[in-house]
Image: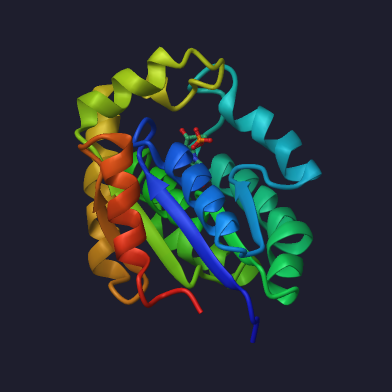
Amino acid sequence: MSQGFFLSFEGADGSGKSTQARRLAAYLRGKGRQVVLTREPGGSTGAEEIRRLLVEGDPGRWSAKTEILLFTAARRDHLERTILPALARGEIVISDRFADSTRVYQGAARAELRQTVEALHALMIGTEPDLTLVIDIDAKTGLARGLARNSGEDRFEELGAGFQQKLRTGYRALLTDFPERCIGIDGNASEETVAQRIRDALQGHLP
Ligand code: TMP
């Protein structure tokens, strides 16, 4: 049993989760907590290399099944080298995305491969966050925000508005699939208001 606390942020592209993850990390550090802020795909040297293969280039570059393998390979390295050591040190790990992203993106939105995702997850990862905050945002707003960033990492955003709507539906289903660890946060508000909603939702959860 780890003594730290593993918190993940989830949501469609442009939901504001990365900003909120950063804000929460700063807030908790201000309270004297040891926090590791990390992300997926990425979060370790090897996983960041795999990230570039996944988020850049043509939308049809990989099939959904190949993507599942690449995301899982990146996740395994991230888990071994970043997440588990931090939890063993008793720290709070905040990850901007984790396995739920594969459940929703590859398992529900990009393809219907949820069984494959679950089987590979059980075999190779086998770890869930202690708590997951799912930020819900209007699909059009999310897509506009994501593309406006012009980050060069638009492979998934380029799949379009219909895809963003499927993501939203997939994330809502996650709340019913894992009610014991998933909390929905309404992200259709100012950054400050959403940050306050997140702090309220965390009350009583952090050790
Ligand atoms: P990011 O923009 O939140 O850093 O994530 C990069 C993209 O990768 C984003 O469009 C979501 C996608 N993604 C998946 O499709 N499956 C996954 O398992 C993860 C972690 C991300």
The x, y position of residue 184, in whole percent, is: 26, 57
The x, y position of residue 103, in whole percent, is: 41, 54
Task: Locate residue 122 relative to residue 170 in the image: left or right.
Answer: right
Residue 34 against residue 59 in the figure, above or below = below
Residue 126 against residue 99 in the figure, above or below = below
The x, y position of residue 204, in whole percent, is: 37, 77
- The image quadrant that residue 111 belongs to is top left
Residue at 48% x, 20% y is 154
The x, y position of residue 38, in whole percent, is: 63, 49
- The image quadrant that residue 54 belongs to is top right
Residue 86 against residue 20 in the figure, above or below = below
Question: Quadrant where the N terminus lies?
Answer: bottom right
Residue at 74% x, 58% y is 82
Residue at 53% x, 58% y is 28
Residue at 27% x, 54% y is 197
Observer-nearest residue: 162 or 193?
193
- The image quadrant that residue 160 belongs to is top left
Task: Locate residue 182 relative to residue 25 in the image: left or right.
Answer: left
Observer-nearest residue: 152 or 6?
6
Rendering colour mode: rainbow
